[in-house]
Image (cartoon, grey):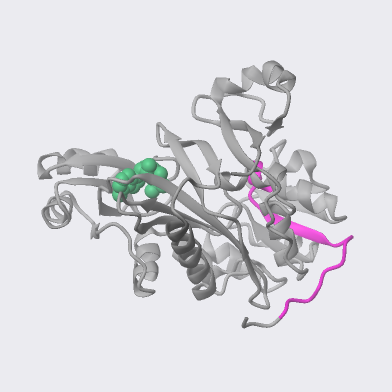
Amino acid sequence: MTGTPLPRLAPGSTIGMLGAGQLGRMTALAAARLGYTTHVYAPDAADSPASQVSAAATVADWDDLDALERFARSVDVVTLEWENVPVATVEHLRRFTAVHPGPNVLSVAQDRIAEKSFVNALGIATAPWRPAGSADDVARAVAEVGPRCVLKSTRLGYDGKGQARLDGGDGAAAAWAAIGGGKAGVEGIVEGFVTFACEVSVIVARGGDGAMVAYPAVENRHKDGILDVTIAPARVTPETAAEADRVARRIAEALDLVGVLAVEMFVTPDGAVLVNEMAPRPHNSGHWTMDACASDQFEQLVRAVCGLPLGSVERVADAEMTNLIGDDVLRWPELLAEPGARLHLYGKAEARPGRKMGHVNRLVPRR
Ligand code: AMP
């Protein structure tokens, strides 16, 4: 263990939350369970999933310095549920209060090139990749990493958005246009396509004193680029699970993270692990912990940023988490009636296609 313990914030303190979506909501609920209150800050915080369950909400832009200062002075610590909060916003907040995770973590996690460079520098493998700033760069990168590849925007992509598949260099111009290439601020990264046996993720919580806990690797299945089902734990060999755990802990430590980090990885057919991406916040693939573990991922975030000891990651059952995307949420009556199904809804009024509306956890006896 390294690091300095954070000041311990007692129950009754206020946690500031940047971002107002479902991850903020579930963190606010975990905070409330431990006697903390939450103040949400986001441009879209009005009647949001997080503000519905928080004591206060500030609706203001990320560059509204006065609103940020008022917010920072009204809370005891700040955390976030969205890693793309501008680094300048966090730098400004830090003049008035502590923010965890800090700007060093965000600048790595906000940019796929920074992220992959950071991971590779630790000796951890990723898919082969090349930066691409033009259609010509894309064509050159395809020649280098191999014909089957994916072009991704380096920033602000999620749930498969800002991505284009390539099969050979011919489609370079079309792929570049598809991710918005040529628009101000858009840069690309070409990644070799990984023929994976499965996708896994590991969620690590780390305190200011360097203490760490990690949930077991889980298996993630995607549909249309969006997480569909998480199976906990992953059906991989003990060696692969241990390697995924080692990789996630190594990254959290190297980032000097205070908070929660999700690391998504590909498992190759021979059991090797390649990092795909990371998110320094609670993650959709950790929602199963809400019903199957002694302390869930949201409580771990509260504990980490409030300087409390981390909770137990003990798993009382195996679990399968299914996302409710768009109209899936209309199935709530039958899910409520299903014995043992644990329904979590996010309070979003409109069920747009592709929108995460809730999830359901089903527990099964431990394998
Ligand atoms: P991402 O936004 O990077 O998490 O990508 C979304 C999903 O696309 C991943 O979970 C994978 O299923 C797929 N994907 C992304 N990059 C690759 C890759 N290099 N090789 C194979 N599949 C990929």
Is 210 drawn above or below residue 270 in the view shown?
below
Q: Residue 259, how many percent across, how many down?
A: 64, 64
Please provide percent x and percent y for residue 281: 59, 56
The residue located at (40%, 63%) in the rendering is: 115
Q: At which x and y percent is residue 275?
A: 39, 58
In which quarter of the view is residue 99 placed? bottom right
For the question of whether residue 134 can be seen, the reply is: yes
- In the picture, residue 361 is in which quadrant? top right
The answer to whether residue 259 shows anywhere in this view is no
Judge left or right: residue 79 versus residue 236. right
Magenta segment's dominant SS is loop
Judging depth in this view, the residue of 206 and 50 nearest the camera is 206
Query: Disc count in the image?
Result: 0
The N terminus is located in which quarter? Answer: bottom right
Residue nearer the viewer, 41 or 219 = 219
Image quarter (top left, top right, bottom left or bottom right) of the C terminus: top right
Residue at the spot x=73%, y=22% of the render?
Answer: 336
Q: Which quadrant does ligand 1 occupy?
A: top left
Q: Is residue 7 magenta?
A: yes
Q: Is residue 20 magenta?
A: yes
Image-based side of 327 in relation to 173, left or right: right
Q: Does residue 215 lie above or below 347 as drawn? A: below
Task: Give whichever of 256, 126 is nearer the camera.
Answer: 126
Foreground pick, 42 / 7: 7
Q: Which residues are magenta?
A: 5-24
Which x, y percent locates residue 347? 70, 31
Which residue is rendered at x = 88% and y = 55% of the image?
35
Q: Is residue 150 left or right of residue 246?
A: left
